[in-house]
Image (cartoon, helix red, strand yellow):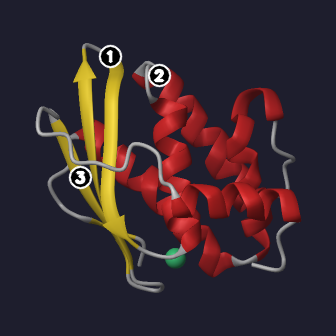
Amino acid sequence: MSELSDLYQEVILDHHKRPRNYQELPAANRKAEGYNPLCGDQLTLFLQLDGDVVTDVGFVGSGCAISRASASLMTTAVKGKTVAEVQSLFRNFHEMVTTDVDPDPERLGKLAVFAGVREFPARVKCASLAWHTLQAALHGDEQPVRTE
Ligand code: ZN
């Protein structure tokens, strides 16, 4: 973690210790599981989708600080958004962690803390796991998501 700036580390550690929306949603109408065998991160994501709006989202699971913090920040970022807005955010996030394009703070907000992981391909999988699992939940995929 020493590779990330102090501020970014602080945000990531905060979300790792106190993950937001860390709960099962019994009323969820979408659910998906994600697994990153490279690191051992696993999570179950719950979505409440009303029309095309994500009205509620929750997750449970276990994993490294980056995977947990990413899932936590992802849930806070997508709650209340339309599916189209979520997809656009996913593209922005994915571009940020896989290319040299600088993150757009207006669009990504706190998600920009993960920009540093692009230098560490193994960490990209940790940071992306929640987002790929979200895609599966939105698409209604029954198969668990694996990053490998
Ligand atoms: Zn991990």
Identify the disc placed on residue 84: 2
| 70 relative to 137 in the view: left or right | right
Identify the disc placed on residue 52: 1
Residue 125: percent from the left, percent from the top? 54, 70
Q: Amino acid at mark 3?
A: Ala
Q: Residue furthest top?
A: 51
Helix, strand or loop under label 2: helix
Q: Amino acid at mark 1?
A: Asp
Q: Amino acid at mark 2?
A: Ala
Question: Which image quarter is the C terminus in?
Answer: bottom left
Could you tell me if the residues under marks 1 and 3 are in contact, i.e. CB atoms within 8 Å? no
Q: Looking at the image, which residue is at 82% across and 35% down?
A: 104
Front residue (pair 92, 27): 27
Q: Looking at the image, which residue is at 67% across and 77% down?
A: 121
Residue 94: percent from the left, percent from the top? 62, 51
Q: Quadrant of residue 10?
A: bottom right
Q: Is mark 1 within 8 Å of ligand 1?
A: no
Residue 58: percent from the left, percent from the top? 32, 43
Helix, strand or loop under label 1: loop
**Sequence-first tag of 3 and 2:** 3
Q: Residues within 10 Å of mark 3 (few under 14, many from 20)?
A: many
Between disc 3 and disc 2, the foreground one is: 3
